[in-house]
């Protein structure tokens, strides 16, 4: 099968990591994959790709004048030329702005197009009013629209009522994660670690996590908290930590190039976000066998945890419940071990790459017949 895969960029990020994982997975099994980042400033490919993946930067095909003066028109022509050149069996596109461009640019070409939302559309602010209008116009042309979680379906149906063939395919676990031996090394100290990870922005609610840890710190003097990541809220969170008097026990170590290695050092992983599209960081922490506490935010944690079976699930905004869940795991090393092992087995079975590729195969198979029929009618 020939797959033409459009993404916004290949910078470090959740959608980019998933794109690299899927493209490499398809190529590894013998599909012909062309991965085309559409970002006009190009950038670099942060994630490694299978050597068989053909990486085509759309910016290289737009020319300096097109990128600078007429980016939208130049991108439209570049997409159409690439589709004609590659003659794919199916086109897959990630992210709303890319999806809209691809749908407009491929009209009348007779190739099935599957577009994918990578955030929770009911809560995401990445699509402004104009882009939302374009989405309502163009998404009904797609042969399938893929969302990341069941929680997103109802809201998306209201936002884009004309969209057809809504599908749910969660993110896959990166296969490299399963290949690593990341069992925590024996610690030289008796310190225990609560860990969180993500961009330091308000919707991640790291202030609530700091507040919860501060409330528990006196009863658990051998525990520390580390929040990995960087972002505009760093100064505010640093000030909050100073005010708790726990600067020696709560740290903001910044970004890491080895997130899984840092996760593997944790005794407990906590997710406190107000909203997620699909929380890769929670999926990866569970796959690494970490005992997890997560708020029941839209969308993903309830599905990942199987209604709280494989991670402690607390109501969003319920600070006492968050404290109780953290304390429950901090109190009980046996519970941490059992929950972590069961969580790893569960998500590795449900979100392994081979399982997710099979689900994509089903989506593609359902999308292609309608495109074939439409091309027959147009002919």
Image: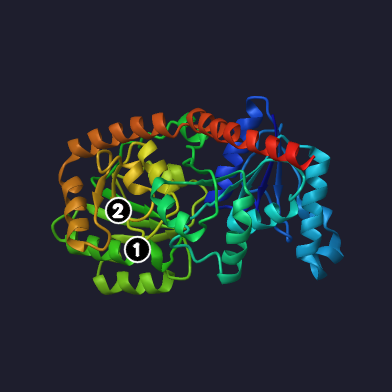
Q: Secondary structure at mark 1?
A: helix
Q: Quadrant of the C terminus?
A: top right
Q: Looking at the image, which is closer to me, 128 or 378?
A: 378
Q: Position of residue 267 (x, y in %)?
A: 28, 44
Q: Quadrant of the N terminus?
A: top right
Q: Is residue 209 above or below residue 149?
A: below
Q: Position of residue 362 (x, y in %)?
A: 54, 31
Residue at 25% x, 49% y is: 313
Q: CA distance from mark 2 to mark 1?
A: 15 Å
Q: Position of residue 59 (x, y in %)?
A: 78, 56
Residue 95 appears left or right of 191: right
Residues marked 2 and 1 touching at CB (< 8 Å): no
| Residue receiving disc 2 | 296
Residue 134 appears left or right of 224: right
Residue at the extreme front of the image, as rendered: 377
Residue at 53% x, 43% y is: 165
Q: Looking at the image, which is closer to me, 285 or 59?
A: 59
N-term mark: 2 or 1:
1
Q: Is residue 272 visible?
A: yes
Q: Position of residue 89 (x, y in %)?
A: 71, 34
Q: Is residue 119 above or below residue 17?
A: below
| Residue receiving disc 1 | 206
Q: Is residue 3 visible?
A: no
Residue at 67% x, 40% y is: 112
Residue at 31% x, 69% y is: 241
Residue 330 appears left or right of 149: left
| Chosen colour scheme | rainbow
Camera-near label (2 vs 1) is 2
Q: Looking at the image, which is closer to me, 100 or 178?
A: 100
Q: Secondary structure at mark 2?
A: loop
């Amino acid at each position: 099968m020939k797959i033409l895969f459009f993404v916004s960029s290949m910078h470090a990020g959740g959608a980019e990591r998933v794109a690299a994982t899927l493209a490499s997975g398809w190529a590894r099994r013998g599909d012909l994959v062309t991965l085309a980042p559409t970002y006009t400033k190009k950038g670099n490919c942060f994630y490694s790709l299978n050597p068989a993946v053909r990486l085509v930067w759309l910016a290289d095909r737009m020319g300096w004048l097109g990128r600078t003066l007429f980016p939208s028109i130049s991108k439209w022509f570049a997409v159409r030329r690439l589709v004609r050149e590659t003659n794919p069996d199916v086109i897959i596109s990630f992210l709303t702005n890319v999806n809209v461009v691809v749908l407009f640019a491929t009209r009348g070409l007779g190739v099935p197009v599957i577009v994918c939302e990578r955030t929770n559309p009911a809560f995401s602010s990445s699509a402004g009013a104009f882009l939302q209008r374009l989405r309502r116009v163009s998404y009904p042309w797609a042969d399938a629209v893929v969302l990341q979680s069941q929680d997103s379906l109802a809201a998306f149906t209201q936002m884009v009522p004309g969209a057809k063939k809504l599908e749910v395919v969660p993110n896959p676990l990166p296969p490299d994660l399963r290949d690593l031996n990341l069992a925590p090394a024996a610690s030289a100290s008796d310190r225990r670690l609560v860990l969180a990870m993500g961009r330091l922005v308000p919707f991640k609610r790291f202030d609530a996590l700091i507040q919860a840890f501060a409330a528990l710190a006196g009863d658990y003097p051998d525990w520390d908290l580390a929040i990995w990541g960087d972002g505009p809220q760093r100064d505010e969170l640093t000030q909050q930590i100073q005010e708790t008097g726990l600067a020696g026990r709560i740290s903001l170590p910044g970004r890491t190039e080895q997130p899984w290695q840092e996760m593997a050092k944790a005794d407990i992983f906590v997710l406190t976000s107000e909203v997620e599209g699909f929380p890769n960081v929670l999926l990866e922490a569970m796959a690494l066998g970490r005992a997890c506490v997560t708020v029941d935010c839209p969308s993903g944690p309830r599905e990942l945890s199987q209604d709280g079976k494989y991670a402690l699930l607390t109501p969003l905004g319920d600070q006492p419940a968050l404290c109780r869940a953290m304390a429950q795991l901090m109190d009980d090393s046996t519970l941490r071990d059992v929950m972590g092992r069961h969580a790893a087995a569960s998500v590795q079975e449900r979100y392994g790459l081979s399982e997710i590729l099979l689900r994509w195969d089903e989506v593609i198979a359902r999308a292609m017949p309608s495109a074939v029929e439409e091309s027959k009618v147009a002919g």
